[in-house]
Image (spheres, rainbow, N blue to C red):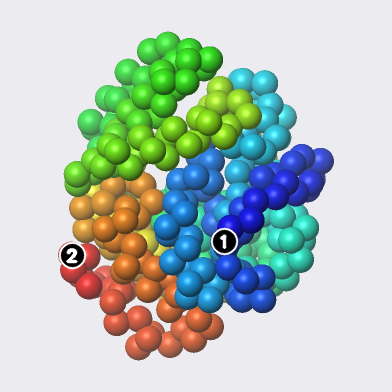
Amino acid sequence: MSVERIVSVNGVELCTNAFGESRDPALLLVAGMSSPMDWWEDGFCERLAAGRRHVVRYDLRDTGRSTTYPPGEPGYTGADLRQDVIALLDALGIQEAHLVGVSMGAAMAQCVAVEHPDRVSSLTLIDTTAALPGSPEGLPGMDPELSDYLAAAHARAEPDWSDREAVVEWLVQEQRAFMRGGFDEPRVRRVATQIVDRSVDMAAILNHAHLDPGPDPEGNLADVVAPTLVVHGTADPLFPLPHGEALARAIPNAALLPLEGVGHELPPPAHWDRVVAALLQHTSGDHEPAELPCLTDAAGSSDGAG
């Protein structure tokens, strides 16, 4: 059974949702840009909780039921979002957590890991790229099809935020642009509808695109001491697979789990068995390399066949 609550931190309110027993090791799920916690689907969280993990997901500022700001005027920086992670752990009475982030959330998690190493038990970085110095230059850019879509999106008018169906459709099409390998429209539409129905101000989700990053954290990827698992879709159109491979090489002793045919998205249900098993293994406290037979290292095969 999950429990939702509003927590006051850093002068704002964040909506949180927890699964499992609080006495179990804590996993904090950090969503991506403009993404409420709903994209961490109930079934995924429940499987982790069934593995004796205390799973906490939350709405970032300007998403879901957390504090929102006027559209185009975010009153905070990217650094504030990082500080929210630590403040949230404090408010929930969690001394250390396994951070699991996707895309922008995984970039935040990298920075938190070097800024507050004593608070991070492990890192799992999904579909992201380096947020700290130490990764090689010359990594491939985004897929041209996605680049064209995003360029056209800038020229299109925003949806009528008061029109529920129009906003749901907009969310569905946004997700379609980033996903690959068999778009599950009914599933995406269900989550998108849930997001629209529970959000305070859908227009505010675009504020993340206007964020000042704030001060850079000190340190680089080689300074990450938390055991790290990099999960990356082999068909990611925003950050192609070499970004994940480079990240796994740059972080000491990191492991790489490629997901065949997956785009820039949270692992879809067809991959939950493998990803949940890897996450439970990774957060077990035993990080001997031999314990991760289903994974490759950064130089190994990326066929995702397990």
Image quadrant containing the N terminus: bottom right
Name the disc covering residue 1, or none: 1
Nearer mark to the viewer, of 1 and 2: 1
Give 305 or 14, whichever is nearer the viewer.
14
Image quadrant containing the C terminus: bottom left
Q: How many marks?
A: 2
Give 33 or 139, whichever is nearer the viewer.
33
Counting from the top left corner in percent of width and height, residue 109 is at: 56, 57
Q: In terms of image quadrants, where is residue 205?
A: top right
Residue at mark 2: 303
- Mark 1 residue type: Met
Give 199 or 120, whichever is nearer the viewer.
199
Q: In terms of image quadrants, where is residue 141?
A: top left
| Residue name at image x 26 percent, y 51 percent | 262
Label 1 environment density (alpha carbons within 10 Å; few <14, some 14–19, many ≥20): few
Label 2 environment density (alpha carbons within 10 Å; few <14, some 14–19, many ≥20): few
Q: In terms of image quadrants, where is residue 179?
A: top left
- Mark 2 residue type: Asp
